Amino acid sequence: MLLRLSIRDFAVVAHAELDFGAGMTVISGETGAGKSLLVDALGFLSGARADAGAVRFGAQRAELSAEFSLADCPQAALWLRAAELDDGEACLLRRVLHADGGSRAWINGRPVALSQLAELAELLVELHGQHAQQALLERPRQTALLDACLRQPELLDNTRDAALRWKALHAERRGLLARGDVAERQRWLQFQLEELDAQPLAPGVLAELDASHRRHTHAAALIAVCDDTVDALAGDAAIGSRLQRLRAGLQRESAHDARLGEVDTLLDSASIQLDEAVSQLQRIRDDLDLDPDALASLERQLTRMQDLARKHRVAPEQLQAHRDALAVELDSLADADDKLRRLDADIAAAHAAWTQLASRLRDARCETGATLSSSVSALIAQLGMEGGVFEIQFERNPDAQPDPNGSERAEFLVSANPGQPPRPLRKIASGGELSRISLAIEVAAQDQDAVPTMVFDEVDAGIGGAVAAAVGHKLRALGQGRQVLCVTHQPQVAAAGHAHYRVRKAAQDGVTQSAVAALDTAGRVEEIARMLGGSDVSDEARSAARRLLDAH
C-alpha cells in the first residue's frame, strides 16, 4: 500500500507531500490545476521514460519519492529479497529527473537500473490512465488479463514449460539433421583426425620445434660466440688466470689489512662463477652442430604445422584443441541414428504433454471467461451501458505447433447498446466506454489481482449523473479490499472517497504553481459544491454536496 508520495520541482508543483491510507482516496481540482500530475509522478516512479519537460521551469531537477508498506504485497517483498534490496517492511522508491533529460533511480536508497524500478513498481501499483486503457485493446493483454483470473499459475507454467521443451528438442533435432549425411560426416571427421594425429600438435611440441629451428638457423653464430667467450675467460692470458694472480697479491698483503681478505673472498666467488660459466658454455658448444639436414627437417615440420593451421583456419597453437573438438563431434555421431530415434520419441512425448495441458488450459479459460463475461456485463449495465453485453471469444492459433501461451487467444467483445451484436473491443469502444469497461473488469477481477494499489486517472470521463454515482460506488467497493486512488472531476465520484485531496493552481511571484491540500469534512463540502455548481458556490450546492457525502 502506498503510504506517502513526495514531489519537488515537478511540472508546476514546487513541493507536495501526500499521505495515503487504505480505501479510496480522490484527487480533484479545477481543469488545468495539475491534478493528474500526481498520477504522472507515480508513472515516473514506475519506470516511465524520463522527460526533461517534467522538471519545473527554472529548476535543475525534479525529485520524486514514494513509500510503500509491504504488508499487503508479499510478492514485492520476495522480489526485494531476491535482488538484495530489502529493508524491513517498507519500501522507498526514489527518482530524480534532470533538466537535461537524464534521470537516476533508487530503491531503498540503493541505485538501480530503470528496468529494476519498473519491475518492482509493477508489483506495487497499477496505473489506469489513457495508456493503460489503450493497452486493454491489445489481444495479448486481454489473454494475459483472463489468465490472471484463472487462479491456476501452475497450469500456465506447465503449459509454457512443455512448449519450450518441445521447441528445444525440435531445435536439437534440426541441428543433428543440419550436419547432413551422418556416415559421410563421420568419414570426413575421421580423415581430418588421421591427418592431424600424424603431426605432433601439443603447444609444448610447437614451442620446442620453434626453438630448435632458431638454434639450427643461427648455429654458426652461436658456436662462434661460445668459442670466443671461452677463450676470453679461460687459458693463461684469460680473465680467469689474471684473477688468480690478483688474488695471490691480495692474500700476501691481507696480513696487514684484514679488509683485503674480504675482497679476496668476493673474488673467490667470482672465480667460481667464471669456472661455472665456462663449463656451461662448453656444454652449449657441444650441443651445437652445423647440420643442414636437421635444419631442413625442422623447416619441413614447421611448414606442415603452418599448412595444417591454415587448412583448419586456426592458429598453430590451437591445433590440439581443434583436433579434440573434432574427436568429440565424432564420438557424438557414433550413435546418431539412435539419438535421432530418441529425439523423435521425446518430441512426440513433449507434444502430447503440451496438447493435454493446453486442452486443460482451454477448458479453464472458457469456464473463467464465462464467469468474467457475466460479471462484467452486469457491471457495465450499472455503469451506464444498460443492455450492454461483454463476451470473451477464443480463436485457435493458426500454427499447430506448441505455443507457450496455449492453443488459443482470447479477444474481448462488447455490445454497448441493446440489439447490437458484440464486436471486438478495439473497434467500437469510445474513450468513456473503455474507461467504464476497464473499471468493470477490475471490479470483477479484484480478488485475483495481487497488486495492492490501483490508480485511476479520469476513469469517469464523459459521464455524469447516475452513471457517475455508480462509478463512484464501484470504486469505493473496490477500495474495500484494495487501496484506490482516483483523479476525478465528477462530484458523485469525489463524494465516494474515504479521503480527499484538492489540487489548486495559483500565481506566486509571477510563476504559476500548483498546491495540494488534504480536505477535512468542511473542505470536502466546499470542493464538491464547487464541482457541482462552479466557482460561485451557493448554499444549494453545499446542501447537495452534503447529501452526496451522507450517501456514503
Image (spheres, rainbow, N blue to C red):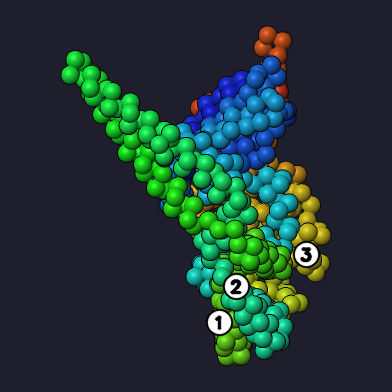
Closest to the observer, 143 or 441? 143
Q: Name the spot of residue 456 as percent of width and height, x first.
A: 63, 44
- Please, is residue 239 above or below residue 159 in the view? above
Q: Residue at x 45, y 47 (%)?
A: 281
In this view, the mark in front (2 or 3): 2
Closest to the observer, 481 or 101? 101
Residue 20 in the figure: left or right of residue 269: right
- Please, is residue 266 above or below residue 180 in the view? above
- Please, is residue 318 above or below residue 174 in the view? above
Instruction: Look at the numbered disc 1 and give the secondary structure of its residue.
Output: helix
Mark 2 neighbour class, 10 Å CA radius: few under 14, some 14 to 19, many 20 or more: few
Instruction: Look at the numbered disc 2 and give the secondary structure of its residue.
Output: loop
Mark 3 neighbour class, 10 Å CA radius: few under 14, some 14 to 19, many 20 or more: some
Instruction: Look at the numbered disc 3 and give the secondary structure of its residue.
Output: strand
Mark 1 neighbour class, 10 Å CA radius: few under 14, some 14 to 19, many 20 or more: few
Badge 3 is on which residue? 424
Which amino acid type is shown beneath numbered disc 1?
Asp
Badge 1 is on which residue? 331
Q: Name the spot of residue 179 as percent of width and height, x first.
A: 69, 80
- Is any part of residue 195 visible from this angle? yes
Residue 34 in the figure: left or right of residue 71: right
